[in-house]
Image (cartoon, rainbow, N blue to C red):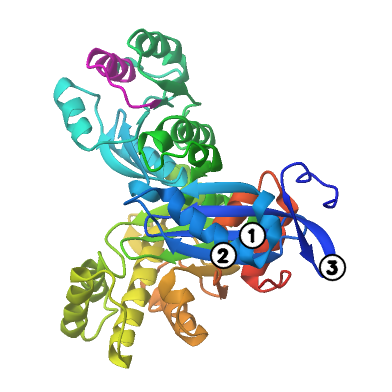
Amino acid sequence: MCAAGGWDRLAGCGWRGGVSVALVVAVDFGSTFTKAVAVDSGSGELVARAEHRTTIDTDVMDGWQACRAVLEAADRGVRNAEVLACSSAGGGLRIGVVGNEELVTAEAGKRVALSSGGRVVAVVSGGLSAASQKELRKDRPDVVLLLGGTDGGNSAVLLKAAETLAKYKWRKPVVVAGNIEAQTEITETLTAADVPHVLAENVVPEIGVFAPDSARAAIREMFLEHVIGGKNLSRDPSFARMVRAATPDVVLRGVEVLAALHGDVAVVDIGGATTDVHSVIELDPEDANLGREVVAPHPVTRTVEGDLGMRWSAVPVVAAGAEAGLIANADEVHAAAERRRADPSYLPDSGREASYDETLASVAATVALRRHAGRQRIVFGPGGRVIERSGKDLREVDLLVGSGGVLRHNPPEVAARILGSIGTNAQEEGWLVPQRAEVCVDADYVLAAVGLLADDAPKAAEGLAAHIHGTGPSGH
């Protein structure tokens, strides 16, 4: 029998050193590749890993079955192991934000959407009219986040938006996370029109307060109930049962586990189309700047830079790098970026081409972290010299983790140079990016698995997270 424990009922039995152990499998259905790992559910040991092209053209489960065959060949316990999955296949989670004031709506809604594992495809402020709901439909959001008004404040715009959704027979799921006192009336309006919806606590209950957790959980609920099946990624009903959340949502949960072990953590994931940054830090309660923010910073944050990537977004990377003074030979790198945009499957075939990839990755990581963090400047006003700070201060981050193919598939010294480049001119220009962080790479791409295991098998999640840092049990 497998060893006793919380996973005894769920996991398959494998063998480690002649001892029977319980295994669990974590799968990430990515937009390009499907990745899977088999993990000892007690220690978090990485038993086996596999990846296969995501088979959206046929059935996403085809890619998973290919991965499963590799894992089973490594350990027979995989055959009966519980499988947990996350997904960003089929374009991921598209979120439309509808609210009151542009500043609060755009900022709070974008933050909630990103921390929930989605990307904002539309922002409608000032209410929802017949014309703006028509434009919203064109952006094809999977979920609409309806917010606006502080608790007890003006609810007219929020109520009008709900009435517009009902009038025009909106059928995509809606998460209501605005003025709590308007929720009863909104529920009656949406229910009468058969608009699928779920209620959450107000994202901005008062000015200067940002409370995303309830809305984040509600978006996850809608993603699982309405979005996964609606993308028609698989004919196999077990796919929907496997998926627990959107991949970026799960990765952010994994970063929280890392932070519990190592202190403040930032993760930069350099992809072909985007560069994502996740951070979990302890905010300084004495920072006077927080009280002046319309939407306060939050300890747990994710940002997505859609114009910074190694292939599809390579050309904008060069423009961003040139503007920031990070690229000396911009024309030469621009030509290389054009080649990569034209052929996203391109792999460097010479040392020079490899150096272009390194340059693109260094710029993408540096600019993405700058945008995610804040900036500090000295300004002069009526009271004299004042330090003005905006954004999130990451200078004291303890651990910086790199992810993405350009880091995983290159020698360690290349990854070290790429991640080391983020401090370029940082102090001189006031960027609040990590300054003395320990640096490592998620070489086996297990952060998503850590997030999947975090709630059901926390000890295994911790063990696997330690593997990222090089201190966990050794895997295959």
Query: Which mark is on residue 38?
Result: 1
Whether residue 311 can be seen here: yes
Q: Position of residue 179 (x, y in %)?
A: 43, 21
Whether residue 256 can be seen here: no
| Separation (CA) of disc 1 from disc 3 | 17 Å
Q: Residue at coordinates 24% horizontally, 85% vertically from top-left?
A: 328
| Residue under pointer 2 | 70
| Residue under pointer 3 | 18
Q: Is residue 101 depicted above or below 463 in this figure?
A: above
Q: Say what amino acid the circle numbered 3 marks.
A: Gly
Q: Residue at coordinates 39% horizontally, 70% vertically from top-left?
A: 365
Residue range (magenta): 157-174
Q: Say what amino acid the circle numbered 1 marks.
A: Ala
Which quadrant holds residue 364? bottom left
Q: Residue at coordinates 68% horizontally, 49% vertically from top-left?
A: 80
Q: Say what amino acid the circle numbered 2 marks.
A: Val
| Separation (CA) of disc 2 from disc 1 | 10 Å
Q: Secondary structure at mark 1?
A: strand
Q: Secondary structure at mark 2?
A: helix
Please tell me which of labels 2 and 1 falls first in the chain: 1
Nearest the viewer among 241 and 315 is 241
Nearest the viewer among 95 and 44 is 44
Please tell me which of labels 1 and 3 falls first in the chain: 3
Which quadrant holds residue 193? top left
| Tally of numbered tags | 3
Dominant secondary structure of the residues highlighted in magenta in the image: helix
Q: Secondary structure at mark 3?
A: loop
Q: Position of residue 38 (x, y in %)?
A: 64, 59
